[in-house]
Amino acid sequence: MELPIYLDNNATTPLDPRVLEAMLPYFTTKFGNAASRNHAFGWVAEEGVDYAREQAAKLIGCTEKEIIFTSGATEADNLGIKGVFEMYQDKGNHIITATTEHKAVLDTCKHLEKLGAKVTYLKVQEDGLINLAELEAAMTEQTILVTIMYGNNEIGVVQPIKEISAIAHKYGALFMTDATQAVGKIPVDVNADGIDLLAFSAHKMYGPKGVGVLYVRRKNPRVKVTAQMDGGGHERGMRSGTLNVPGIVGLGKACELCRLEMDAEAARLSALRDKLESALSVMEESYVNGNTQHRLPHVANISFKYVEGEGLMMAMKDLAVSSGSACTSASLEPSYVLKSLGLSDDLAHSSIRFGLGRFTTEEEIDYAIENTKKAVNHLRDLSPLWEMFKEGIDLSKIEWAEH
Amino acid sequence: MAYSEKVMEHYTNPRNVGTLDKDSKSVGTGLVGAPECGDVMRLQIEVDENNVITDAKFKTFGCGSAIASSSLATEWLKGKTVDEAMTIDNMDIVEELALPPVKIHCSVLAEDAIKSAINDYRVKNGMEPIALPKSHH
């Protein structure tokens, strides 16, 4: 076992060697421009792209023509939301999203507010799921788009996508989902789920960075988005720019592997995750964040009360994890996702996200459990709050110095 | 963000972790910060009849830089008179630990903790608290 151990697979994943192998020829011998229609170099590149498009389509249950390649999920989110807003402005200007979305969605919506959009940011319940009745109550005749993420990047909760899309459609709005954390990890089917637009990226599923997909439905209804990048009219005019052929080939191979290995891999990862989570949540004053039924198989988000996350990560120096604490940011604000669940700031500051992946082994999880326990205990020995808690002092009754 | 060697050193081997008897007249306790902000420091000093700090202890809830700042502060406090201790400036801590700008608040908190401990000691012993400049936060 090599140290440090990578447990931050919701941030990014290592490239699968099989993906790299598929990509390599497209950097050198098969370097052609996929848009070159008049010679073999172009045809070879186009073949690679076509195969990738087919694999991406198979993974989410759509047709090849509905796949628009982008530079990643952030661009796909931007294109989907801004593109729908522009294309459907005659119909309305109202967009519904949730407070726990990724910044690529939230900041895009904020941008559109400046351009005249009305945006409803739905709050989530304590377990991270949105309230369907609140969604329905927020729908208006002006609502053109509901965009709710599939699986959350910080806590892993999976939203009731079918129910959400049904409500959106009932009121004549389109439904989009940022499925970056879910695609390749759990079954996602755009028809069964009623999805009109969907964004994901390759690097969260053992593919390369810098390439992603926007799925845009072509039938029932035929969805159109206004291009946000103008130029040569690539990708059915929705996203111009010479195709990133090696990246796209890598994305395709990554999709293929995820599809073929998903069932076994999800079972393996959730067993490892459960082992990690149950070992750590039996520690005194530790809390699992988010719904533990409806969630991705590879994420555990745990708060260790009376210990600060960033300090804790420093003590877990052989583990690469992430924290909802934000001691490095000027604002000192902890994770907005955890705060949306109603977590107090101190619990949000005390959280650690463990993100397991394809290359995580049981030996690594065993090590992570021991290492984390040791670190938490060490920092609690240093923590005045832990000492006060142990003395039975109610910390909420203390008047903390202005800070 | 990478931590400086000195921060890592203090973090890995924190000096003077512990608790002094907060009810003792010779002990001053400073508790600063807030759990919601992600850092709380408790710094304690023990002062002898010559106004010399004979012992200092800390416990800190916070990031590595906050822990290192308070560890360093206790190291500096021991052997100083109370008057000398009042002159410790947060920028001395920043310099010694090579703290980056986003971590300066950790040193400010350590300075606040020192002054707050000294004031607690003064008040306990019938002296006026020293007026503190408004917290930098």
Image (cartoon, coloured by chain):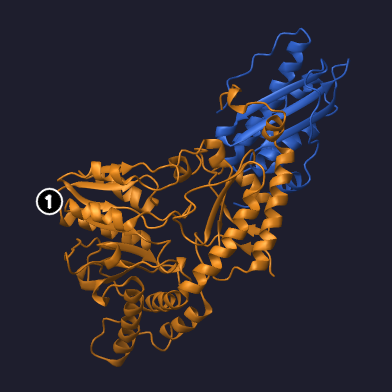
Chain colours: A orange, B blue
Is B109 on the left or on the right of A290, as rendered?
right
Q: Residue at x 69, y 61 (%)?
A: A367
Residue farthest bottom in this picture? A40
**Residue topped by disc 1:** A91
Residue farthest right in this picture? B49
Q: Nearer the viewer, residue A245 or A172?
A: A172
Quadrant assignment, res A389: top right
Quadrant of the image for the C terminus of chain A?
Answer: top right
Q: How many marks?
A: 1
Residue A291 visible somewhere in the drawing: yes
Q: Nearer the viewer, residue A46 or B90?
A: A46
Q: Position of residue B114 (x, y in %)?
A: 72, 25
Is A369 on the left or on the right of A73, as rendered?
right
Residue A114 visible somewhere in the drawing: no
A294 lies above or below A359: above
Quadrant of the image for the N terminus of chain A?
Answer: bottom right
Q: Amino acid at mark 1?
A: Lys
Q: Nearer the viewer, residue B35 or A301?
A: A301
- Helix, strand or loop at label 1? It is loop
Q: Position of residue B97 (x, y in %)?
A: 70, 42
Q: Residue at x 64, y 30 (%)?
A: B109
Q: Position of residue B96 (x, y in %)?
A: 72, 40
